[in-house]
Image: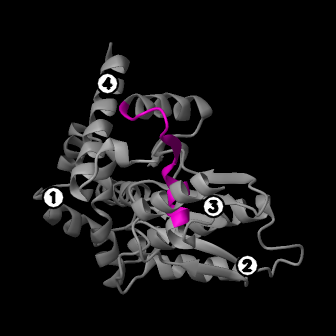
Amino acid sequence: MCIVYAETAARDSLEQVISEALVRSGSDKSDVRGVCLGVSGVNHPSDQDKIENWIRDMFPSHVKVYVQNDAIVALASGTMGKLHGCVLIAGTGCIAYGFDEDGKEARASGGGPILGDWGSGYGIAAQALTAVIRAHDGRGPQTLLTSTILKALGLTSPDELIGWTYADPSWARIAALVPQVVFCAEAGDEISDKILVDAAEDLALSVKAVVQRLGLCGEDGTASFPVVMVGGVLNAKRKWDIGKEVSKRINRFFPGAQTIIPKVEPAVGAALLAMNFLTS
């Protein structure tokens, strides 16, 4: 029953978003030639088929429908619709995804917090919470994270963190603590600094894995290719700049990597993909 309800809710939300987009553009369904969606968690053809069938039921039969993982439309937003290179997304979660010139795909990370997306916002914040508990019970060094996180959450003792964490262990709720970790690192807290350094290393390694599997760097490792960087963790524009640190590490691995911060939203990437699919 729960699965059926979740699918119904997802389909209803999708239909509402599409309806709102049509209204804002002053169009109706008869004006549409193609639909391209970037959906988080679409990692298997069966996922794509299910959502594509939902969309086809919403539009006339002549409308072409394309459903992709959200990482793919994020890549397109930085390459203006060309599916070549690698995209790194680091927000609440993280994933690296890429294509070579022949259309071969590869990915790294993206398995969620249980499977170790430690460079994500969730991963950074979860490690910070762990550091506070370790400092409190004597297993780890004292850290500025303790007072900073408690103040941010309106708590008075690390003991209260346990209740706070498990009262609603949603990924986004935990990931929202990343700014506190960055603040502490900027203030010189060694524990926070290490958490962010480790995150930057992990994110760069995800890109490295994709690039090597696809051979994007060429035989000598110096070929030029784009690395599109998307997400709040990478684009926070703070003094301790995670995105900048990740870029440095990527360029150490691959001198020819061209890191790109998209100037348009992923939704524009989806529109560009839809145009390319229609004309190819």
Q: CA distance from mark 3 to mark 1?
A: 32 Å
Residue lying at 69% horizontally and 59% vertically, measured from the top left: 99
The Cα atoms of the two marked residues, 1 and 4, are separated by 34 Å
131 in magenta: no
Quadrant where the C terminus lies? bottom right
Q: Secondary structure at mark 4?
A: helix
The quadrant of the rendering that contains the N terminus is top left
Name the N-terminal-most of marks 1 and 4.
4
Residue for badge 4:
8
Foreground label between 3 and 1: 3
Q: Earlier in the sequence, mark 2 or mark 4?
A: 4
Q: Which residue is mark 1?
A: 153
Residue matched to label 2:
254
Taking depth in this image into account, of 222 and 174 the one nearest to the observer is 222
Mark 2 element type? loop
Which residues are the magenta region? 58-76
Identity, as a three-letter code, of the amino acid under mark 2: Phe
Residue 48 vs residue 113, the one in the foreground: 48
Residue 147 rendering spot, x and y as whole percentages: 20, 68
Residue 135 shown left or right of residue 16 in the figure: right
Q: Please give the residue where the numbered disc 3 appears in the rendered image.
A: 206
N-terminal of the two: label 3 or label 1?
A: 1
